[in-house]
Image (cartoon, grey):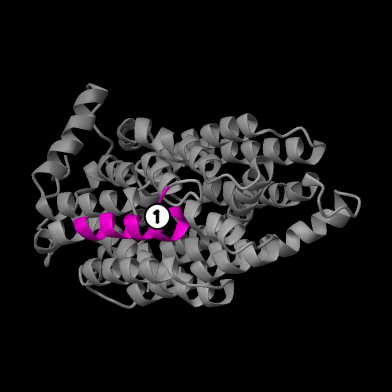
Amino acid sequence: MALRHPNFRRYWISQLLSLVGSWMQTTAQQYLVLELTNGSSAALGWVTVAQFMPSLLFSLFAGAVIDRVPRRRVLLATQVILMFTALALGITTHLGIVTLPMVLGIAFLAGMANAFDMPARQSMVVDFVPRESVPNAVALNSLSFNVSRTIGQALFGAVAALGVSLLAGGNADNISRLAFPYYLNVLSFFYVIYVIATLPFPERELARSDSMIENVKEGLRYVRRTPAVRNVMLLVGALSLTIINFNVIIPYFARVVYGQREGGFGLMSAAFGIGAMAGALWQASKPNPLRNLRIGSLILSVSAALLAFTPTPGLAVPVLAACGFGMLSLLVSANSTVQLSIPDELRGRVMSLYTFVLAGMGPPGALIASKLISREWILGPRWGLIALVALGLTALLLLWRRLPRSLPQIKQKSAA
C-alpha cells in the first residue's frame, strides 16, 4: 500500500486538501460562465479551450523542462501561479466586474501553469514509492483527485449559499456569491505549497543539457517504438476528443437539459465524482493495471449512451456515477501502464506526452462536444451525446486488439 510510505502520504494528503478547493473553483467557474452567457454551451467549450490549450501547445516542452529542472522548483512555481489566478477570479467576481473575456484570460493563465504542473505531479509519484507500489500510488493519486472532486462539487452548492449571505447581501441572484469558492481555494494552496517546499525529494538523473528539441524528440521516439505506450496514448487521446468531455457535458445537461440550479448542479457533479472515486478504488486493488483498459472504456461508453436518454435529473445521478466509474477505471489503468513502461530518465517527457493526449485534446474535444450537444444544433443535446459516444466507440474498436496485455521490459540506464 503506497500510503505506508510517509513522504507519499504527506504529499497525498496535501493534494487532497488543495484539490477540494480547486474543484469548488472549477464548479463555480462553470456555473459563472453559464450565468454570464445565459446558458451557452459554446461559451463553456471556449473556456475549456482556454484552460487546456496550453497543454496542447506546451506540454511536450514542459516534459523536457521537468526532466532538466528539479521537480520541487517546477511545482512551487505552478502552485503559486494557480493560487493567484484563483485570487483574481475571486476579486473580480466579488466586485461584479467579471466578464467572459476575463474568465477566458484567467483560464488560459491557469492552463499555462497546469501544462507544467500536471506532468510534474504525475512524474513525482515514483519519487516516493518503490516500483511494486506504483500502480497503487497512481490509483491513490487518481482517488485523491476524485475524492476531492466529489467533496468540492458537493460543497459548491453550500458554499455558494454561504456566499449569498456573506458576499452578496442576501441576494441569491447577485453574481458576487460565486466569489466565495474562489477565496476558499486560495486558502487551500498555502498547505500544499508548504508540503512541497519541505518534502525530501530524492536525487535523480536529470536529462542531458543538450538541445531542448533533441530532448523532446528522444521522448517521442521512445513512445513511437513502444507499442504498449503508443496504443494506450492513442486510446486516451481518442476518448479525450469525444466522450471524456464531462466538464462540458455535465454543466450543460444540468443547467439547460434538466433546468437545475446550484444545488442540483452540485449533486450531479458529485455523483460523477463518487463514481470516479469508486473506479479509482477498484483499480487500486488490481495488481495488473492492463485489465481495465478495455473494461473501463466499455463502461464509460455504455453509461454515456444511457445518459443521453435519461429523462430526469434524479435518474441521471446513478448514470453519471457509472460514467465516472468507467472513466477512472480506464484512466488509472492507462496511467499505471504508461508509468510502468518507461525508464526514469524519460519519465517527464513521456508523461508530458500523456498529458498532451489527455488534457491537450481538451480544447478540440470541448469544441466538438459543445457543438454536438448544443440545443441550437440539428441533433440537440441527447442525440449529440450519442454521436460523441459513437465516435469514441469507433476508436476503441479500432484499437481493441492492439492494446497491450503485458508490460514491456524497461531498459534503465546504468548509473555513471
Magenta segment, prevailing SS (helix, strand or loop) = helix
User: Residue lying furthest right in this view?
Assistant: 169
Q: Residue at x 60, y 49 (%)?
A: 30
User: Residue lying furthest front in this view?
Assistant: 378
Q: Is disc 1 placed on a helix, strand or loop?
A: helix
Q: Nearer the viewer, residue 344 or 87?
A: 87
Q: Position of residue 70 (x, y in %)?
A: 39, 37
Residue 375 horizontal side relative to residue 297, left or right = right
Which residues are the magenta region?
Answer: 378-394
Q: Which residue is mark 1?
A: 384
Residue 127 covered by magenta stretch: no
Quadrant for the N terminus, please.
bottom left
Q: Nearer the viewer, residue 129 or 238?
A: 238
On the question of residue 329 being in view, the answer is no
Q: Residue at x 18, y 55 (%)?
A: 341
Q: Position of residue 354 (x, y in %)?
A: 29, 47
User: Does 204 sit above or below residue 109?
Assistant: below
**Mark 1 packing: few (<14 Cα in 10 Å), some, or many (20+)?**
many
Tell me the amino acid under the disc marked 1. Answer: Gly
Quadrant for the C terminus, please.
top left
The quadrant holding residue 150 is bottom right
The quadrant holding residue 312 is bottom right
Residue 388 covered by magenta stretch: yes
Q: Position of residue 53 (x, y in %)?
A: 42, 34
Q: Nearer the viewer, residue 65 or 7?
A: 65
